[in-house]
Amino acid sequence: MNYDILKEVNKVYKKENPSFYTKITRKNLSKLIIAREKLLLNLKLPKKIFQDCTLLDLGSGSGIYSLIYNHLGAKTELVEYEKKFIEQSKSLFKKFAINPNYKISNIDIFKYKNNKKFDIVTFNGVAHHTQNPKKILSNACKFLNKKGFFIYGIGNKSGFFQRALQRLILYKISKNEKEIIKNAKILFKKHIQRARKFGGRTTDQIIFDTYINPKIDCQSTAEINEIFRKNKMNMYSAFPELNYSNLFFNKTINNYRNFNLEKKYKKIQKEIYLSEHEWLTSTNYLFNSRLINKINKLDLLKNNLTSEVNDKNYKNFKLNYIRILNIANQYKKNIKHFNKIKFFNQSYQTEFLREVIGLFKLLKKDNCNLKEIHNYLKEKKFIFKGTAGVGMNYYVGYKYK
Ligand SMILES: C[S@@+](CC[C@H](N)C(=O)[O-])C[C@H]1O[C@@H](n2cnc3c(N)ncnc32)[C@H](O)[C@@H]1O
């Protein structure tokens, strides 16, 4: 396995990412525990299940999250190949651990062996910085016990799409790393401010994590699900939550809500149990194959679009703009097929795509520069606004066999 890029990433992390060295005090530890419990609840994992369970944290970094699981009662094992982080984890655990049952192993995940399996495996923020996210994920799944939970934190290709575009812009208009940092502060000022406010990272950390880090190879939910399935795991939960098209077609209560998105929930007087209409006839007539074909086509275009911009860095960011414009235009066109059913906000999506296409056209030009991009983005209503996609997605797999 070639770890060149990864080594490079870690070198920069050590040098420039002080989040790994943030001083932990009892006070900020309590805050971090509360935030993690909230995330776990969003993932439908009550904190009770951590009490006395065995937990493996692969690529544990500074060890702060392993420490939180230790506080929830888990017997925790940390696996990390960077010595510095191991030292940091050791001192953290010495100072703050509650459950004395813990082990800190300084080893590469690929070389790590253990006959014992774990009730919970966490694998957070690691895979997308490695050469082969699928392989390392498959490897990580092997350590999970039957009836155990696998907590996976990763950038999703769609969620990260807008950040991937921001990276492309910066690489196109900047001559070196210094300029990337300077231009990021100009173009994505609001995005960085927002990330600072809600994520607790400094500007430097955000710029490093999002724009400088040379390896961010995201995955799609389908890719993750496939690996889960191969490892006898079901998708148990996700955050942000997943909306499935089959749920939509089955028209459960959630999907009834989707029909009425624009009315806003508060205006809904009563709920209509569409299933009862089905039960009149006892037939499962709701399966509409033409519509499903259209959704499949749209999904394929979305996958192609997000894959085109995925995993680019300063040394490798060339795109085939003719192909990508073609895909983006087709995607925009195909959204129109769904103008009668609201399962996502098509008009918003179409406008957003229009802006993305305009941006690709600008980037295609050899002489595209900061001023032009700045002026273009200034007038836009949708692109890079709000959270600008989703920075990190969490998936929980449940091992049924
Ligand atoms: C972005 S950090 C995430 C740390 C931690 N899981 C968290 O959520 O904060 C990725 C960590 O994975 C570690 N790592 C990456 N590949 C690894 C491997 N093959 N074996 C062991 N550790 C690895 C890196 O050294 C780094 O500490």
Image (tube, rainbow, N blue to C red):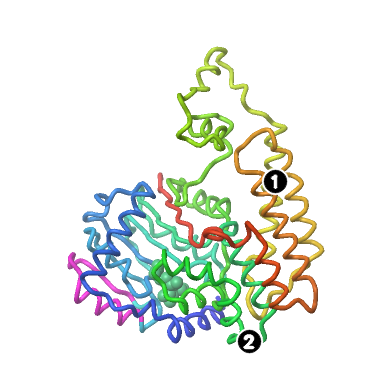
- Closer-to-camera residue (266/212): 266
Quarter that holds the C terminus: top left
Question: What residue is at 72 percent from the left and 39 percent from the top?
Answer: 294
Q: Measuring from the top left, give residue 71's x and y in whole percent.
A: 22, 62
Question: For the residue marked with disc 1, what is the amino acid?
Answer: Leu
Question: For the residue marked with disc 2, what is the amino acid?
Answer: Asn
Q: CA distance from mark 1 to mark 2?
A: 37 Å
Magenta residue check for 166: no
Crowdedness near tag 2: few (<14), some (14–19) or many (≥20) residues, C-alpha within 10 Å: few
Q: Is residue 59 visible?
A: no
- Closer-to-camera residue (91/138): 91
Residue under pointer 2? 176
- Closer-to-camera residue (261/323): 261
Residue at the top extreme of this rendering:
280
> In the figure, 284 relative to 292: above or below?
above
Residue stretch in magenta: 85-105
Question: What residue is at 40 percent from the left and 78 percent from the top?
Answer: 81
Residue under pointer 1? 298
Q: Measuring from the top left, give residue 186's x and y in whole percent.
A: 59, 76
